[in-house]
Amino acid sequence: MLKDYPTHTTVPCQNLERARGFYSEKLGLEASRDEPGGLIYEGPHGSRFLLFQSGGAASGDHTQMGWQVDNIEAQVKELKGRGVKFEDYDFDGFDRGTSIATFGTSRSAWFKDSEGNLLGIVQLPG
């Protein structure tokens, strides 16, 4: 059954080299493998994602991938310092000054990559 296997994310991009540059320069990530199907990035605990060339355009309407972080304020500050532009929303719990939304004890922030994919970071309680 699928419950016994790890998941991985696939993220479309119209320009693979532009996306590679964004993920490297803005997010500090380097592909661990360059495969015919795209770029594979590996993270801790078996997490990984694939950037693949696609003719379709990203909708940017929903979060397509996210990272769980320990200190969201520090991550937002570091990413902004690298030129990442965070999304701005108008809903209860969203602080425009910090670009961070609070939902109970969870906190989140979102930004788009070079291809228009909506990416997020979240700090969970505990």
Image (cartoon, helix red, strand yellow):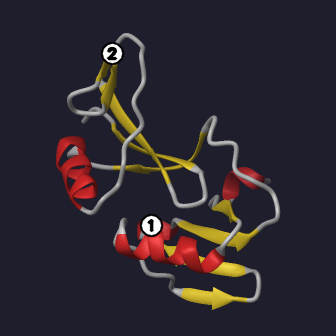
Image position of 118 (left or right of 54): left
What residue appears at the point 59 percent right and 51 percent down from the top-left corner? Answer: 117
Quarter of the picture containing the C terminus is top left
Q: Quadrant of residue 60?
A: top right
From the top left corner, tell me how far across and down residue 120 is, in percent: 45, 44
From the top left corner, tell me how far across and down residue 100 is, in percent: 30, 31
Q: Who is closer to the viewer here, 117 or 3?
A: 117
Mark 1 crowdedness (10 Å alpha carbons): few <14, some 14-19, many ≥20: few
The correct choice, above or below, for 22 with respect to 32 in the image is above
The correct choice, above or below, for 115 with respect to 3 in the image is below
Image position of 46 (left or right of 121): right
Residue 70 appears in view = no
What residue appears at the point 19 percent right and 42 percent down from the top-left corner? Answer: 73
From the top left corner, tell me how far across and down residue 86 is, in percent: 37, 42
Q: Which residue is mark 1?
A: 45
From the top left corner, tell me how far across and down residue 74 is, in percent: 17, 49
Q: Who is closer to the viewer here, 59 or 70?
A: 59
Label 2 vs label 1, nearer the camera: 2
Q: Who is closer to the viewer here, 71 or 93?
A: 93
What residue appears at the point 19 percent right and 49 percent down from the top-left corner? Answer: 77
Q: Secondary structure at mark 2?
A: loop
User: Could you say which disc has been placed on residue 93 in the image?
Assistant: 2
Mark toward the start of the polypeptide (2 vs 1):
1
The amino acid beneath tag 2 is: Gly
Q: How many marks?
A: 2
Q: Secondary structure at mark 1?
A: helix
The amino acid beneath tag 1 is: His
